[in-house]
């Protein structure tokens, strides 16, 4: 069924493919991020209600969206790792978790810094904020679990199970603002309706979201390549590759 | 797909499904506890099927729109009182302290405090809720003249 995907389960083939992707994605991601943040933070009109404070949206929303996007990708990798027992899928979990954890931390921190002047509080235990905090703990749990066993294979499997189980938190995060009374407002762009943000503010925001997604891809490529090299360090092809680099 | 993989696929999917169901059930059962605040209607009419009302003296959060013209400030202190409304009943909030920048009449806010009587809350903290709409100020000014007309009520009542 997945015959065309089969060769990429082989670490060496995947290593070379990721290298080609990374060379394109890395500069593209940084370029888009530079355009999006400069445009968003410097050249958009202020908001009618929140003035200039709302500009942090250009960092907060992309980080929050990709904290969940990264978790979804990690859960898919975990599913493949558990069912098909493909080594590179297990390594991919370890490659994605720290990046997702950083995105989540950025989303939480920028959210707190935004909430203090606007809502009047850094933190409130409402459904949206609490479920996003749980997401951070899930990431940290996956990272910790993967390195908690002297037998690497046991740790990989435990981390994969946790990563997969934690996926139930994603719909809770997304729909928390609809299902319950929360201090956090409803969705602005991630809904099946016209975005409730003016086009002059929407475009830089969309660029920032795409940029962070591309950057996530690039960073995963880089981290997964490093992981492949570490796990395969005694293989002849790695030695040969290292000699070519030297 | 070989039988072992099929078995694992089945096991993993079953675990995910059962866990999703379990968490969904728990969240549904707890839904009233997850709410951050009471709305004025919930405070006055009671919550859920059992119509449980909070008792006087209970610490709670109340969230609603500040009624236009209801904000009364004390001239010599930071004492302020205002009314909150959602779809019907009105709840009065008393507060002493600094209000958030976004506080204004017509704004959604969340206040934390103790219930003094059926429709009065003594707040210790007032937070502003803002909506999910973002637009430049000049566009907002232009939209001010557009009157939102309530849909015609058919048969006298709705």
Image: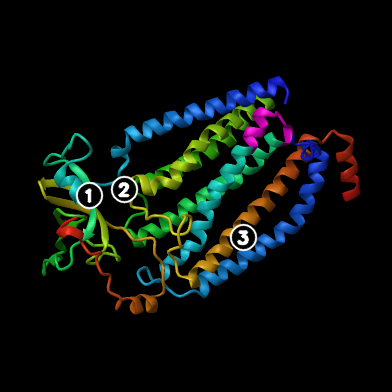
Q: Is residue A83 magenta?
A: yes
Residue B96 visible in the picture: no
Write down the quadrant of residue A26 in the picture: bottom right
The chain to which mark 1 is attached is: B
Q: Quadrant of residue B74?
A: bottom left
Query: A125 or B51: nearer the eye?
Result: B51
* CB contact under 8 Å: marks 1 and 2: yes
- Distance CA(mark 1)–CA(mark 2): 9 Å
Marked residue chain, label 2:
A
Residues behind callouts 1 and 3 on a single chain: no
Give the Cα distance between marks 1 and 3: 39 Å
Please give the residue where the numbered disc 3 appears in the rendered image: A211
Which stretch appears magenta?
A77-88
Q: Residue furthest left?
A: B117
Give coordinates of residue A225: x percent, y percent.
75, 44
SS for callout 2: loop
Quarter that holds the N terminus of chain A: top right
The answer to which of marks 2 and 3 sits earlier in the sequence is 2
Q: Check whether the beta carbons of the residues at disc 1 and disc 3 lie within 8 A of each other.
A: no
Residue A125 x, y percent position in the rendering: 35, 45
Q: Which residue is label 1 attached to?
A: B39
């Amino acid at each position: 069924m997945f015959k065309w995907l089969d060769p990429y389960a082989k670490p060496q083939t995947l290593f070379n493919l990721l290298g080609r992707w990374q060379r394109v994605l890395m500069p593209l991601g940084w370029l888009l991020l530079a355009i999006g943040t400069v445009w968003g933070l410097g050249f958009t009109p202020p908001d009618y209600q929140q003035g200039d404070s709302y500009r942090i949206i250009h960092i907060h929303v992309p980080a929050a969206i990709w904290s969940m996007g990264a978790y979804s990708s990690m859960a898919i990798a975990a599913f493949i790792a558990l069912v098909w027992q493909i080594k590179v899928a297990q390594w991919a979990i370890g490659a994605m978790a720290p990046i997702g954890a950083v995105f989540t931390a950025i989303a939480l921190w920028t959210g707190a810094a935004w909430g203090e002047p606007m809502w009047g509080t850094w933190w409130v235990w409402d459904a949206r904020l609490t479920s996003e905090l749980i997401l951070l703990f899930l990431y940290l749990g996956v990272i910790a679990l993967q390195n908690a066993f002297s037998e690497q294979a046991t740790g990989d499997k435990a981390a994969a199970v946790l990563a997969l189980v934690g996926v139930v938190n994603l719909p809770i995060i997304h729909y928390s603002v609809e299902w319950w009374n929360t201090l956090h407002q409803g969705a602005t762009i991630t809904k099946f309706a016209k975005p409730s943000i003016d086009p002059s503010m929407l475009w830089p925001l969309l660029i920032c979201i795409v940029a962070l997604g591309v950057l996530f891809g690039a960073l995963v490529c880089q981290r997964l390549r490093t992981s492949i090299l570490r796990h395969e360090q005694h293989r002849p092809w790695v030695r040969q590759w290292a000699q070519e680099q030297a | 797909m070989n039988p072992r993989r099929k078995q694992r696929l089945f096991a993993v999917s079953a675990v995910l499904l059962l866990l999703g169901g379990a968490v969904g059930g728990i969240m549904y059962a707890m839904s009233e506890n997850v709410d951050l605040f009471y709305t004025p209607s919930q405070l006055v009419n009671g919550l859920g099927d059992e119509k449980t009302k909070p008792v006087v003296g209970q610490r709670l959060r109340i969230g609603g729109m500040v009624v236009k013209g209801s904000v009364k400030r004390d001239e010599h202190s930071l004492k302020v009182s205002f009314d909150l409304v959602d779809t019907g009943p009105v709840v009065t909030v008393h507060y002493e302290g600094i209000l958030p920048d976004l506080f204004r009449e017509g704004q959604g806010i969340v206040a934390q405090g103790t219930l003094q009587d059926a429709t009065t809350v003594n707040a210790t903290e007032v937070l502003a809720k803002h909506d999910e709409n973002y637009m430049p100020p000049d566009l907002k000014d232009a939209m001010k003249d557009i009157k939102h007309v309530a849909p015609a009520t058919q048969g006298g009542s709705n």
